[in-house]
Image (tube, coloured by chain):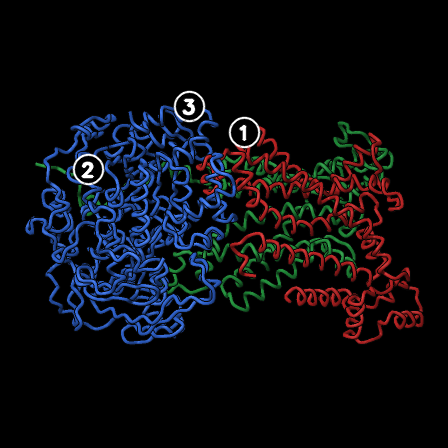
């Protein structure tokens, strides 16, 4: 219920800020040379002459029935443009998440368990550096090293899923660029969670039963680490979506981010509205999902929901 | 050959020696108590025996258990012993259990880890173990998560895990400190029974001499990481040889000794001056660590005393041990608290002390105060009274004017809030359920209750910090519960508070002088602020320069003195003290109680003293109200309530309170089970 | 005569305070010296700030001066980091970019704090429906990451440093609100606040005298961490063309331009990349270190 209300308010904000504030879109699209007649004609065509509340209802109604509207500029239905963009962005985010987890869990665990030894400190330092290098910077560095110098992998462009192997190849570097940073951020949380478990009384109890340190950690630590880490992972999914927008730009991938930035440049308001709302909705839904997950994993707060 | 032989055990963190070379042994089937105040290193010693020390803390020396040196044994071998031959029960049962794993699985794990039982057999055995630790519905508890259990049930579960494999040695680290008195009593009985039936050896770690004396045969006393005395329980209680132990025994005896109708209140408690230095500081201290607090200290004490036999089976580490005339301390004697004996208190009591003309505070004799109990000028604990205890305070009698009263007070919390109390229940919690109380001028009213009794809620409502759901609170006959804050100025000036946690009740970022001055500024009390702060610090006997310090630079007892000084700042007439001495170590607790007693007399305070501790309330209060589940189940003069309790709950509470020299389970008149678990 | 050490505390009255050495271990300075994060973080952050200040009055060359005679110069004594496609001195541009980045970061963090901290205090103090409303509002704003806000602002007003600052500030507001609220709730539940209330101290005064000073370490730490995020966001948004337009000497922009010449002069990309990473690392470490310094419980772990 709360989620739906929040989504409704979010859509209203997006609409108001984008559709009402910046003056007349038709003038912007046609440029300064446009005749008043042409402007009026385009305004009619886009439905911008209707009262604002009507425009909002039309827009939301369209969204709810799956009609995202038509791009002001290209005249293409936005649904199909967005659809093909998501074919790139979706797998990219998925790949980033995978890389992130693969990095975060071992790195965080290692630096926690070895926190009092040199190897653990080194892991911690690597982790810090990983957080400090933004994904697009890492992307550029990867292009220089893996692409330009070593010619290992494609450094940009996307050939489409008709050739899955080549499509995957072109997603590898962006996926790594995206995943390393997320992995480093989540890795810090894994480290904290593992340290918490290591210093917990219940781990001591488990060892007092005769379990070895390793076995106690696996049997009693896993779930206790999983609860906070999964929460962070969910929240970081939003970070991944945003990161994808930037990384797509680095690797010139025809994804949602590229579409968004193009539309900003072209003042293609309705596309911008749709994508902004889509991302905001994803963030809200993911946060909600994380909440549900959190409650179902931890019996202590299960009753609250 | 003992079962456990600890020799020259040193536990250190960096260069700080937190446990500094201690020796003791536990024989097969023997019950040994390890006594010490916070920071004495007693818990570390237990963890050292288990070789489960926190990260960054290491141990040297030798711990021989069943002919194996645990310090040098490979970890693999230690794992085979832990939970199998030697098991441990921890202080905090909530955090000792994995919050995300069902209780049954955690118990079964104890059984399967040593390969003794299959998984399915372990489940059956787990249910049997729960029945063994007297849990009523074992099947249901097996399926529960730890947070769904009460504190007592949790500790029983931990106990069940510990005895699962019939260990020969059980270590129990403050196993009942986190529990309520009545629950503590039942868990101690259970522990006592289990240890005897299973013929286990027990090492019981506690700060509470009464708890240890109720179960153990021998006692080992630790101070600042060092072992200062070890002997049979009877010897320790009857004639302690180390000055520290003697102080501890005297203090514990006077607060938790024998109760009788003739026991008089408000005698000055014997105390040990000062506080123990912190563990890190103590490890840098050369010589006897107790010498700074010791009346017998000499040049010789700059050298560290070794542990030597004072007599057979009684070892003490002191250059100037007390002589041992037997029968000095008549713990079992009929004449009231033993610590009161003149001989025991000796010249310490007859010192300059409390006496002095300046102490006869202003205006004890208010108009409505002409009580019969008003025993002349307060605090003449000087030579003329020969150290006989004297009542410092008027007992409020029914003729005095009510100063603070509440009628039919009800406070209901929604479950979401009440859940923090750890008690699982749905819907709403009635923290207070129709409470009527009257505090008259000159009253020192004790409110006794266990956790969940609503006593802290009551304090907050009396202080107008929370609003009751229904009912009314009156201050000098004027309702205050429905007044907005701005109309409470006068009441705020007159009613002040001292809380439990001496650190939590002082803002860590303010200097002591600013803390004490805060009410003066807030209430606009006239006069020279700096002068007043100096007076107040003087009144609570803090050193003159402590005003410049921050709370973290003070000891626990000093912090509580600051809190008291702040409460006294606006010259209040009523003081509400919520568990004001509960967080303090035994020896410091006595100091603060003496201060309370003195200040009550000096400033003619009416007091509401909230506590879970019968001994403390008996010592300080002239009237007692017993609170149970939001209701006052008994109220009356302290002597009457304590000696002739009417309600079964009060009887249970009194019987459950540990006393020096009282064996656990001794008192069969105890109404066990009067309180549902 | 028996002589027991059992005395009235009234006689001595004093207890020894924890000795000075122990008190010393509690000092911030002591903990700072023992936190590698704090030391390295402070050094890098200090260097960044000094460079930003120096660049205001002096850079080796004019960061905007075009010199078509010396394009793509390799690093040399004249141009330590070389020159770019227009022959502009890279070091000078990086230095002047420090100034811009830091300015944008500090302003957006302070602006976000100016809104978020009072909002968080209000939510903590009020509770109930108004408090919940503030929280929900924070959740809502949280659903719009800085990038989206920047996109929207750029659509309305075009890209500029102001756009970036506005977007980053707005995105940080809910972070401040949440951190402040949870910190303040913690302090408000402590007994010294109850004691202050029992002394008749007003709510505003409690917030000012007790709550704010006690959550200040938390907020300072948060600000430092957010400053590193702001640097990162500033670079990313400028890189995407949502920030300051060319020819501004901004790190993101330099990176964007250099990317086009990656094949011919990869070093041109490396300089701003390393600068951004180092700056983020510095503030991040400082934030981490401050957490160690202010919260000794966590200090034990690192």
Q: CA distance from mark 2 to mark 3?
A: 33 Å
Q: Mark 3 — on which chain does it sit?
A: B
Q: Which mark is residue B236?
A: 2
- In the foreground, B165 or C173: B165
Q: Is residue C93 visible?
A: no
Q: Which mark is residue B469?
A: none
Q: Same subunit under labels 2 and 3?
A: yes
Local secondary structure at mark 3: loop
Provide the residue designation for mark 1.
A117
Q: Pointer 3 and pointer 1: residues touching (CB < 8 Å)?
A: no
The colour chain A appears in is: red
Q: Give above or below for C279 relative to A275.
A: above
Q: Which mark is residue B72?
A: 3
Mark 1 burial class by Cα count in 10 Å: few <14, some 14-19, many 20+: few
Residue C115 falls left or right of residue B455 = right
Which chain is painted in blue? B
Chain C colour in the picture: green
Q: Is residue C166 above or below residue B52?
A: below
- Classify residue C153 by image quadrant: bottom right
Q: Report whether residue C157 is seen.
A: yes
Mark 2 and mark 1 residues within 8 Å of each other at the beta carbon: no
In-front residue for pair C275/A9: A9
C150 vs B74: above or below: below
Is the residue at mark 3 from the same chain as the one at mark 1?
A: no
**Discs 2 and 1 carry the same chain letter:** no
**Left or right for A212, reference B226:** right
Question: Earlier along the polypeptide chain: callout 2 or callout 3?
Answer: 3
Q: Position of residue B408 (x, y in %)?
A: 33, 74
């Amino acid at each position: 219920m709360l989620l739906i209300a929040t989504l409704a308010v979010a859509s209203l904000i997006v609409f108001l800020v984008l559709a009402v504030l910046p003056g007349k879109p038709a003038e912007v699209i046609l440029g300064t040379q446009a005749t008043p007649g042409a402007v009026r004609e385009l305004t009619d065509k886009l439905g911008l002459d209707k009262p604002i509340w009507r425009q909002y209802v039309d827009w939301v109604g369209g969204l709810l029935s799956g009609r995202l509207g038509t791009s002001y500029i290209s005249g293409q239905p936005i649904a199909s443009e967005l659809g093909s963009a998501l074919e790139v962005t979706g797998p990219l985010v998925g790949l980033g998440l995978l890389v992130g987890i693969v990095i975060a869990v071992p790195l965080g665990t290692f630096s926690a368990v070895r926190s009092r030894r040199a190897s653990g400190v080194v892991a911690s330092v690597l982790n810090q550096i990983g957080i400090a290098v933004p994904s697009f910077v890492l992307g550029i560095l990867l292009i220089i090293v893996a692409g330009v110098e070593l010619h290992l992998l494609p450094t940009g462009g996307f050939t489409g899923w008709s050739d899955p192997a080549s499509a995957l190849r072109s997603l590898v570097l962006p996926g790594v660029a995206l995943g390393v940073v997320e992995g480093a951020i989540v890795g810090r949380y894994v480290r904290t969670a593992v340290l918490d478990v290591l210093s917990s009384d219940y781990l001591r109890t488990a060892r007092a039963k005769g379990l070895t340190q390793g076995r106690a950690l696996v049997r009693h630590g896993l779930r206790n680490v999983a609860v906070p880490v999964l929460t962070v992972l969910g929240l970081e999914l939003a970070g991944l979506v945003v990161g994808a927008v930037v990384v797509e730009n680095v690797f010139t991938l025809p994804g949602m981010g590229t579409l968004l930035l193009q539309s900003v440049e072209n003042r293609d308001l309705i596309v911008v509205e749709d994508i902004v709302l889509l991302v905001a909705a994803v963030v809200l839904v993911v946060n909600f999902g994380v909440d549900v997950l959190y409650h179902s994993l931890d019996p202590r707060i299960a009753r609250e929901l | 050959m003992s079962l456990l032989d600890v020799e020259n055990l040193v536990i250190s963190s960096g260069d700080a020696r937190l446990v500094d070379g201690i020796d003791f042994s536990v024989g097969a089937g023997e019950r040994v108590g390890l006594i010490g105040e916070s920071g004495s290193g007693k818990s570390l010693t237990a963890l050292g025996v288990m070789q489960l020390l926190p990260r960054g803390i290491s141990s040297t020396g030798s711990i021989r258990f069943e002919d194996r040196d645990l310090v040098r044994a490979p970890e693999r071998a230690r794992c085979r012993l832990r939970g199998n031959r030697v098991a441990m029960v921890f202080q905090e049962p909530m955090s000792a259990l994995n919050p995300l794993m069902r209780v049954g699985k955690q118990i079964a794990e104890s059984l399967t880890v040593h390969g003794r039982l299959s998984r399915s057999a372990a489940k059956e055995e787990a249910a049997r173990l729960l029945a063994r630790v007297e849990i009523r519905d074992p099947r249901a508890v097996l399926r529960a998560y730890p947070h769904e259990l009460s504190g007592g049930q949790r500790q029983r579960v931990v106990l069940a895990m510990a005895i699962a494999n019939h260990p020969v040695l059980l270590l129990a680290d403050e196993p009942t400190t986190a529990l309520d008195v009545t629950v503590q009593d039942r868990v101690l009985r259970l522990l006592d029974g289990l240890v005897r039936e299973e013929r286990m050896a027990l090492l019981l770690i506690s700060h509470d001499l009464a708890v240890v004396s109720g179960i153990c045969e021998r006692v080992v006393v630790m101070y600042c990481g060092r072992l200062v005395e070890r002997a049979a329980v009877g010897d320790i209680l009857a004639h302690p040889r180390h000055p520290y132990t003697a102080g501890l025994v005297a203090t514990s005896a006077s607060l938790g000794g024998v109760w009788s109708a003739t026991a008089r209140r408000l005698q000055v408690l014997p105390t040990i001056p000062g506080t123990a230095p912190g563990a890190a500081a103590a490890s840098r201290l050369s010589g006897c660590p107790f010498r700074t607090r010791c009346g017998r200290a000499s040049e010789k004490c700059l050298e560290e005393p070794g542990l030597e036999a004072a007599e057979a089976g009684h070892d003490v580490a002191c250059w100037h041990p007390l002589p041992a005339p037997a029968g000095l301390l008549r713990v079992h004697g009929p004449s009231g608290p033993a610590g009161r004996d003149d001989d025991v208190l000796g010249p310490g009591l007859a010192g300059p002390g409390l006496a002095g003309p300046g102490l006869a505070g202003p205006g004890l004799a208010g108009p409505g105060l002409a009580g019969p109990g008003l025993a002349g000028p307060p605090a003449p604990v000087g030579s003329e009274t020969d150290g006989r205890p004297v009542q410092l305070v008027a007992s409020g009698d029914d003729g005095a004017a009510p100063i603070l009263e509440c009628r039919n007070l009800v406070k209901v919390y929604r479950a979401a809030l009440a859940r923090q109390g750890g008690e699982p229940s749905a819907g709403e919690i009635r923290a207070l359920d129709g409470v009527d109380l009257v505090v008259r001028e000159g009253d020192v009213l004790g409110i006794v209750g266990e956790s969940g009794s609503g006593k802290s809620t009551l304090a907050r409502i009396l202080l107008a910090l929370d609003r009751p759901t229904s009912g009314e609170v009156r201050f000098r006959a004027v309702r205050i519960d429905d007044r907005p804050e701005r109309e409470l100025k006068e009441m705020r000036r007159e009613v002040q508070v001292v809380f439990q946690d001496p650190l939590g009740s002082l803002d860590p970022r303010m200097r002591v002088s600013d803390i004490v001055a805060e009410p003066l500024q807030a209430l606009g009390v006239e006069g020279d602020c700096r002068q007043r702060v100096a007076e107040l610090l003087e009144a609570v006997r803090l050193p003159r320069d402590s005003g410049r310090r921050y709370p973290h630079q003070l000891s626990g007892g000093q912090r509580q003195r600051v809190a008291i000084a702040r409460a006294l700042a606006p010259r209040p007439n009523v003081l509400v003290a919520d568990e004001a001495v509960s967080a303090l170590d035994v020896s410091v607790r006595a100091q603060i109680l003496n201060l309370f007693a003195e200040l009550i007399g000096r400033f003619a305070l009416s007091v509401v003293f909230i506590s879970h501790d019968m001994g403390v309330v008996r010592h300080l209060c002239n009237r007692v109200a017993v609170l149970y589940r939001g209701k006052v189940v008994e109220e009356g003069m302290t002597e009457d309530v304590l000696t002739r309790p009417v309600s079964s709950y009060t009887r249970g509470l009194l019987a459950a309170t540990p006393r020096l020299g009282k064996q656990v389970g001794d008192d069969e008149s105890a109404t066990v089970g009067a309180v549902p678990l | 005569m028996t002589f027991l050490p059992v005395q009235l505390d009234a006689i001595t009255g004093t207890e020894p305070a924890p000795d000075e050495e122990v008190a010393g271990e509690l000092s911030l300075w002591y903990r700072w010296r023992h936190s590698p994060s704090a030391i390295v973080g402070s050094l890098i952050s200090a260097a960044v700030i000094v460079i930003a200040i120096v660049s205001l009055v002096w850079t080796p060359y004019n960061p905007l001066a075009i010199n078509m005679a010396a394009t793509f110069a390799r690093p040399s004594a004249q141009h330590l980091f070389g020159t770019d496609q227009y022959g502009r001195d890279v070091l000078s541009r990086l230095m002047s970019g420090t100034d811009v980045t830091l300015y944008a970061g500090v302003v957006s963090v302070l602006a976000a704090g100016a809104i978020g901290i009072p909002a968080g205090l209000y939510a903590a103090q009020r509770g109930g429906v108004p408090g919940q409303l503030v929280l929900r509002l924070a959740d809502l704003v949280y659903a719009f990451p800085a990038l989206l806000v920047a996109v929207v602002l750029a659509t309305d007003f075009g890209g500029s440093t102001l756009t970036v600052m506005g977007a980053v500030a707005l995105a940080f507001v809910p972070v401040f609100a949440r951190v402040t609220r949870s910190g303040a709730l913690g302090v408000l539940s402590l007994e010294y606040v109850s004691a202050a209330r029992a002394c008749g101290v007003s709510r505003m005064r409690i917030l000012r005298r007790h709550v704010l000073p006690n959550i200040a370490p938390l907020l300072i730490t948060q600000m430092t961490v957010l400053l590193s995020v702001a640097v990162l966001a500033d670079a990313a948004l400028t890189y995407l063309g949502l920030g300051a337009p060319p020819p501004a000497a901004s790190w993101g922009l330099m990176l964007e331009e250099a990317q086009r010449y990656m094949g011919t002069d990869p070093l041109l990309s490396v300089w701003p990349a390393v600068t951004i990473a180092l700056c983020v690392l510095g503030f991040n470490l400082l934030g981490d270190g401050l957490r160690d310094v202010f919260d000794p419980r966590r200090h034990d772990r690192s």
